[in-house]
Image: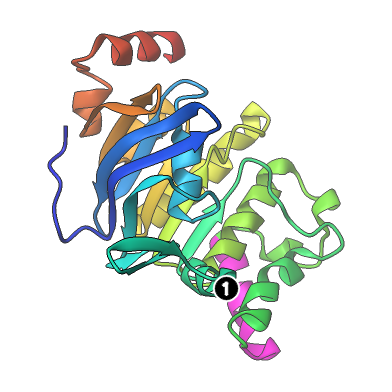
Amino acid sequence: MAELSDDALVQLRGVRKHFGSLEVLQGISMDVHAGQVTVLLGPSGSGKSTLLRCINHLETIDGGRITVDGEVVGYREHGGRMHEMHPREVAKQRRSIGMVFQRFNLFPHKTALENIVEAPMVVSRRSRADAVAEAHALLRRVGLDAWADHYPSQLSGGQQQRIAIARALAMKPKLMLFDEPTSALDPELVGEVLDVMQELAEEGMTMIVVTHEIGFAREVADQVVFMDGGVVVESGAPEAVIDDPQQERTRGFLQSVL
C-alpha cells in the first residue's frame, strides 16, 4: 500500500459510508498528490463510484474525513464534532472540483457552447464575452470548436463526453473526477475521450478516474488503487498493481478483464 502523507492535495482518512445496513466504504484511506493521476479499479459494487461521489460531497459520509487542498469537504468541525455545511457552502467548494459522469448530463436544450458557458456566467459571474472566449478555447482543446452551435442530440456519445469534459474544465478546477467516462460509449468512440484525458494528465491536471480501461490505467496513471467490498485491497504504481499484483483478489479481477 502507498504511504500516506500530510501534503497531498486530496486526503481520505478512514472514510466510511453506509446505505442502510450495507457498509459500502469501510474505512478508506488514500492520498492523491497535485498533478497525479489515480485510477480506481475494481468490480461493480466495490465502492469506487460511491467514493468518487463522496469526494465531491454528492454523497455524505458516515465516518472519517476528506480534504481537498487542505479544506475538509462538506463539513465544518465544531466542538470536536463534524457538522455538515449549508448547501451554498458545499456548492462553493465544488467550484474547484470538476466531475464527469458516465452519462453526459448535458442540457439537451442548449448548444455545446451554451452548455460550457452556463456555469462560469451563473456561478462565477463572468461576463458572457469572457465565458464565450474561454468556451471556444476549451472546445478547440477537445477538438470540437466546429460543433459549438450543435445540440447534444446532434453529437455522438464521444463528442458529448468531450463537451462534458470541457464544461467541467470551464470552472478551472484543482481536481477532476471521472466516473467511468467511457462506459456508455460505443467501442470505437472510447479512444477519443481517453485521448483528451491523457492530454489533461500530461498537462498536469490532478485526476481521479474510475474506469475499466486497463490500458489507460497502465499508460497514464501514477497510482492504481484496486478496491473490492468497500476496502482498498491493493495500491501502488501501475507496473506493481496491474503487472505484478500481490493479492489474489486483484489477480482474479485482472484476469477477468484482460
Q: Which residue is mark 1?
A: 137
Viewed as shown, does residue 199 lie left or right of 128?
Answer: left
Q: How is the image coloured?
A: rainbow
Picture layout, residue 129 above or below residue 41: below
Decide whether residue 139 is among the magenta residues.
Answer: yes
Tell me which secondary structure the magenta stretch mostly adopts: helix
Can residue 254 be seen at all in this image of the molecule?
yes
Query: Quick one: which residue is furthest to the front in this view?
Result: 79
Picture layout, residue 64 above or below residue 130: above
Q: Residues within 10 Å of mark 1 (few under 14, many from 20)?
A: some
| Secondary structure state at the residue bearing disc 1 | helix
Q: Amino acid at mark 1?
A: Ala
Q: Quadrant of the C terminus?
A: top left
Can residue 212 be seen at all in this image of the molecule?
no
> Percent position (x, y) of residue 257?
45, 14
Using the rendered view, name the quadrant where residue 87 is placed.
Answer: bottom right
Of residue 23 and residue 131, the one placed in the foreground of this image is 23
Q: Residue at x 80, y 54 (%)?
A: 152
Q: How many marks?
A: 1
> Percent position (x, y) of residue 73?
40, 62
Q: Residue at x 46, y 20 (%)?
A: 43
Q: Quadrant of the N terminus?
A: top left
Q: Residue at x 83, y 59 (%)?
A: 151
Viewed as shown, does residue 169 lie left or right of 144?
Answer: left
User: Which contiguous range is marked in magenta?
Assistant: 126-141
Picture layout, residue 44 above or below residue 3: above
Of residue 53 and residue 209, the one placed in the foreground of this image is 53
> Percent position (x, y) of residue 177?
47, 51
> Percent position (x, y) of residue 105?
71, 52
Decide whether residue 216 is among the magenta residues.
Answer: no
Q: Residue at x 31, y 40 (%)?
A: 221
